[in-house]
Amino acid sequence: MNTSAKVRVQKMGAFLSSEVMPNIGVFIGWGVLAALFIPTGWLPNETLNQLVSPTMKYLMPLLIAYTGGSNVYGRRGGVIGAFATMGVILGTDINMLAGAMFMGPFAAWCIKKVDKLFEGRVKPGLEMMVNNFSLGLVGAVLMVIGFFAFVPIIEGLITVFSAAINALISRGLLPLMAFFVQPGKVLFLNNAINHGIMIPLGVEQAAETGKSILFMLEANNGCVLGVALAFAIFGKGTAKKAAPGAAFINFFGGIGEVVYPFVLSKPVTLIGQIAGSFVSILIIQNFGGGTVAAISPGSFFALVAVSAKSSLVVNVISYFAGMITSCLVAGFFLKMDKSEEVAGANFSMEKTLSEMGVTGNAAVQPIAAAAAHGAGMTISRIVFACDAGMGSSVMGESIMKTKLNKAMLSMEVVHTSVASIGENVREGDLIVTTKPLEDRVRSMLETNQMKNQVFPVENLLDNEAYDRLIKMLL
């Protein structure tokens, strides 16, 4: 995949993620209700089971629509997004998560354009009336359009995707999804895969059967943990030293991004990750595994927490089977490697200063020189940017705050998603991100006409890179 295509897919995944991630807690809460109170749950209760279906049919799509609309046009966009989405919800018996992900932002975009038409043309004192009536009328029209026009289109798309997944399941071919999902994860396209495809279809399947295997295709991180363990056991140099920490974070925190740089440093180990995922899916498919809700974050304990009662043992076995398989396969390739250091690995960030700091989209210049001599902007804050803005960037922020305190440096450190750089990054901020996301970060800076310096690292837990950054700031 060329760089521009990868950036476009990452942007799409980030947009979908920005709709789903803020509401993941509701998905998990709904999953807990379903796991406990549905007829096949841990504590079957006919009365409390009445909470499950309305929450999934109405609340979850409306929350996603509001969030998506807010991302496009603030609170006003969120309101009309939720309003218009009622049309697609009521127009079908299918759960309209996918419809909400489209309708919310679309409605917000429409009212944004309408507001532009009235800008500067409304007489003083009539602004509130125009704002309220324009939102109401546009929302009503969109609700009707959604009810009659969008529902058949969205139903058709959902039917096609569902039929494709069901065909793979019925033919025993679902494990082949590992060849599509795992390379996508390593290229940081996991949000596009999980939030755009797996979660909407998984919720629909879980509503019908009480659980879904689709939640586990991307979020079962056993195969990722296995690769980290392979580097810890069979790796060399700095990769071997860094891998145990990455494995710990992946198992307990569910953050796969800390492991992907290891795979990118030695691409042949991706075969191990694919093999582990293949085995996990094979076990889940043949022995009735599945979870009642999305697994987020993808830690082992999150997997256990949302496992269906009838699938808990199978899910646990699939996790560790995938881990062992990926560890053995990736370990084999690492063992065969005769070099002193894993080719391409750069976990200690042994790069020239000019490769680590670039001001905006202009020519390369060292961050140290920019800070010391004013060749670039003065660094006022450090901003950690990851895909979703809720995982590795938070951990990177925590590490950097600790290091700054030890160095007795007073500097604000924050985190953000790459998609929110335009809103959350200010002039003079230094952006720290991973190399696979660097092109997208620069694209966002260019789009927003910003010229911030970028500090790319192999992963956002790279202690040695942060030590170097601290030295530059001293």
Image (cartoon, grey):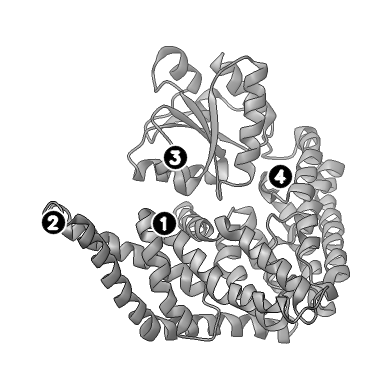
Q: Is residue 329 left or right of residue 25?
A: right
Instruction: Identify the amino acid type marked 2.
Output: Val
The disc label shown at residue 202, or none = none
**Residue 175 falls in image quadrant:** bottom right
Q: Is residue 246 left or right of residue 312?
A: left
- Does residue 332 appear in this view? yes
Q: Describe the element under mark 2 as helix, strand or loop.
A: loop
Q: Circle 4 sits on which residue? A: 262
Q: Nearer the viewer, mark 1 or mark 2?
A: 2
Q: CA distance from mark 4 to mark 3?
A: 29 Å
- Disc 2 or 3, which lies upstream in sequence? 2
Q: Circle 3 sits on which residue? A: 424
Instruction: Identify the amino acid type marked 3.
Output: Asn
Rendering coords of residue 397 (x, y %): 61, 34
Rendering coords of residue 262 (x, y %): 71, 44
**Residue 304 falls in image quadrant:** bottom right
Q: Nearer the viewer, mark 1 or mark 4?
A: 1
**Residue 425 falls in image quadrant:** top left
Rendering coords of residue 199 (x, y %): 61, 68
